[in-house]
């Protein structure tokens, strides 16, 4: 068992999802691509009203701003935290390759406040965007946190200081604690490096509040583990997109109805949908995940924010 009571997830060479399905092999990737019938979506949607977050929030106020995709700005007391930041026009290894942006970010890079910590859930291009990370690092003052074995890539790009966390490990920063928790996913930036680095979610523990960032994940027992270890989150950031076709995506991505189940298991006071609406990464259309979530959610405690919108718990 690893720290935190989580099961072993490393075989000495590669990481894996313990007791759960693994990501489909490369031949299945080819089968999906050859048979794929993506739902048509507009090339670009000009409906984003960009916002400017405050430089800091006061007292016990907790403010969550959806920037785009899985990029969320979390603000509480003296802490500004950014998850999986991407401002690039494509999610890929170079500027001309990879899924292209369908909506602009809800916050301009130049309008970001000082960022105290950047949380990276795994190394896929739509979550670990080096161009964006270099821009944030150039601003100074940011600490970068990545899953196990993920720091080398950032250090090679002078994105520092960077800390690695394994499932069950924690890092204490000024005013909050970051706990690395399991997710059911995989990692790769090329053909030969699959699962050489870990994937994770994070429980962010402030003095008065708890925020859970699920990263990219399939549905599984880890939601109950998070609830048992940390209690009910004030906010849970749960992915809902890139879930079709299910035969291919179910080991690594939740469908909207599974995200609703996760929300209920966590007992989250409020959940916020992420991983949708900006990049079309699978066969579901750009706005299909949010429509599906609206159809299956029980009440308005599971929020669908537009890029640039925010919600908060007042001080």
Image (cartoon, rainbow, N blue to C red):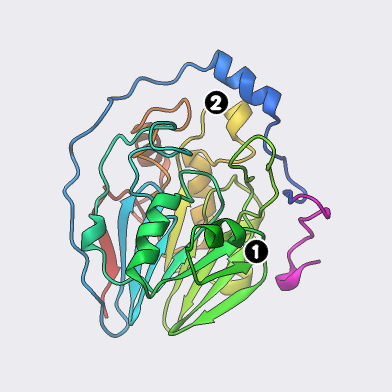
The answer to whether residue 188 is seen in the rendering is yes
Quadrant the N terminus occupies: bottom right
Disc 2: which residue: 245
Question: Residue 170, position in %: x, y?
Answer: 61, 75
Looking at this view, is 20 or 72 the one in front? 72
Give residue 224's quadrant in the image. Answer: bottom right
Q: Determine the CA span between mark 1 and mark 2.
A: 28 Å
Above or below residue 240? Residue 73 is below
The total number of labels drawn is 2
SS assignment for the magenta stretch, majority: loop
Residue 165: mark in rendering: none
Mark 1 or mark 2: whose residue is earlier in sequence: 1
Above or below residue 283? Residue 95 is below
Please name the residue shown 71% across and 72% down the image.
4
Disc 1: which residue: 225
The residue carrying pointer 2 sits among few (fewer than 14), some (14 to 19) or many (20 or more) residues within 10 Å by Cα, namely some
Q: Nearer the viewer, mark 1 or mark 2?
A: 2
90 to the left or right of 223: left
Q: Secondary structure at mark 1?
A: helix
Q: Secondary structure at mark 2?
A: loop
Question: Residue 190, position in %: x, y?
Answer: 61, 38
13 to the left or right of 113: right
Q: Range of the magenta residues?
A: 1-14
Please name the residue shown 68% across and 42% down the image.
194
Residue 6 is one of the magenta-drawn residues = yes
288 to the left or right of 165: left
The answer to whether residue 272 is seen in the rendering is no
The residue carrying pointer 1 sits among few (fewer than 14), some (14 to 19) or many (20 or more) residues within 10 Å by Cα, namely some
Residue 307 is one of the magenta-drawn residues = no
Please name the residue shown 59% across and 62% down the image.
151
Give residue 182's quadrant in the image. Answer: bottom right
């Amino acid at each position: 068992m690893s720290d935190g009571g989580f099961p072993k997830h490393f075989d000495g060479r590669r990481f894996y999802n313990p007791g759960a399905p693994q990501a489909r092999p490369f031949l299945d990737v080819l089968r999906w691509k050859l048979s794929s019938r993506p739902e048509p979506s507009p090339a670009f949607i000009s409906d984003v009203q960009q916002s400017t977050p405050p430089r800091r929030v006061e007292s016990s106020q907790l403010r969550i701003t959806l920037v785009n995709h899985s990029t969320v700005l979390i603000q509480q007391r003296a802490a500004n935290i950014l998850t999986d930041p991407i401002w690039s026009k494509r999610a890929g290894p170079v500027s001309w390759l990879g899924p292209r942006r369908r909506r602009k970010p809800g916050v301009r890079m130049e309008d970001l406040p000082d960022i105290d910590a950047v949380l990276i859930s795994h190394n896929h291009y739509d979550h670990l965007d080096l161009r964006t990370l270099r821009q944030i690092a150039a601003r100074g003052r940011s600490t970068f946190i990545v899953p196990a074995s993920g720091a080398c890539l950032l250090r090679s790009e002078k994105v520092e200081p960077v800390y690695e966390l394994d499932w069950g490990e924690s890092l204490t920063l000024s005013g909050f604690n970051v706990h690395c928790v399991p997710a059911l996913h995989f990692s790769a930036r090329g053909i030969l490096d699959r699962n050489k680095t870990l994937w994770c979610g994070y429980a962010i523990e402030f003095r008065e509040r708890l925020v859970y960032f699920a990263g990219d994940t399939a549905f599984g027992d880890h939601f109950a583990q998070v609830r048992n270890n940390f209690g009910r989150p004030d906010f849970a950031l749960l992915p809902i997109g890139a879930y079709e076709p299910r035969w291919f995506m179910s080991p690594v991505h939740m469908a909207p109805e599974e995200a609703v189940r996760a929300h209920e298991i966590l007992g989250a006071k409020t959940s916020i949908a992420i991983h949708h609406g900006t990049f079309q990464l699978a066969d579901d259309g750009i706005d299909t995940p949010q429509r599906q979530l609206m159809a299956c959610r029980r009440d308005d405690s599971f929020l669908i924010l537009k890029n640039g919108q925010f919600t908060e718990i007042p001080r």
